[in-house]
Image (cartoon, rainbow, N blue to C red):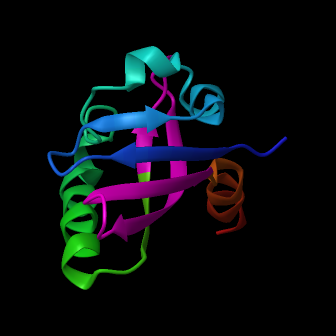
């Protein structure tokens, strides 16, 4: 089964909301994700590109798509494909993420 993570992030980069699918993808209960920084679970090498995406979506005022890796509760790297969507009215970023780990692992095996 494929899960889609849905989150709402405020201007400071704090998670205001996350859906139940986020729990399945990351392995953390939603109530422990809410209030944390979007960078907290990001793999160190991907933090700067994630921060850049978060800033760029506000500057561009439209959808910004990118990929990064997150550490799950059991410290497994999970590859995610994200769409960041800027909401001018609320000044929040709507975040939609899909787990693409299987695809990335298949790519590595193919090469």
Q: To which quarter of the image does residue 61 belong?
A: bottom left
Q: Is the magenta stretch mostly helix, strand or loop?
A: strand
Asked if residue 80 lies in the magenta stretch, the reply is yes
Residue at 18% x, 52% y is: 11
User: Which of 91/48 is in front?
Assistant: 91
Residue 89: x and y in percent read 31, 66
Total marks placed: 0
Question: Quadrant of the image for the C terminus?
Answer: bottom right
Residue at 28% x, 66% y is: 53
Residue at 72% x, 58% y is: 106
Q: Which residue lies furthest to the front in this view?
A: 89
Residue 33: x and y in percent read 40, 24
Q: To which quarter of the image does residue 1 belong?
A: top right
In this picture, residue 85 sits left or right of residue 29: left
Residue at 70% x, 59% y is: 103
User: Which of 57/47 is in front?
Assistant: 57
Position of residue 49 relative to residue 2, above or below, is below
């Amino acid at each position: 089964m494929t899960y889609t993570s849905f989150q709402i992030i405020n201007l400071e980069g704090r998670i205001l909301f996350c859906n139940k699918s986020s729990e399945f993808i990351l392995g953390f209960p939603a109530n422990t994700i809410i209030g944390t920084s979007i960078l907290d679970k990001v793999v160190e090498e991907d933090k700067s590109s994630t921060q850049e995406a978060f800033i760029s979506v506000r500057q561009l005022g439209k959808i910004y798509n990118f990929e990064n890796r997150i550490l799950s509760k059991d410290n497994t790297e999970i590859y995610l494909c994200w769409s960041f969507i800027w909401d001018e009215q609320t000044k929040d970023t709507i975040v939609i993420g899909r787990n693409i780990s299987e695809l990335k692992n298949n790519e590595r095996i193919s090469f």
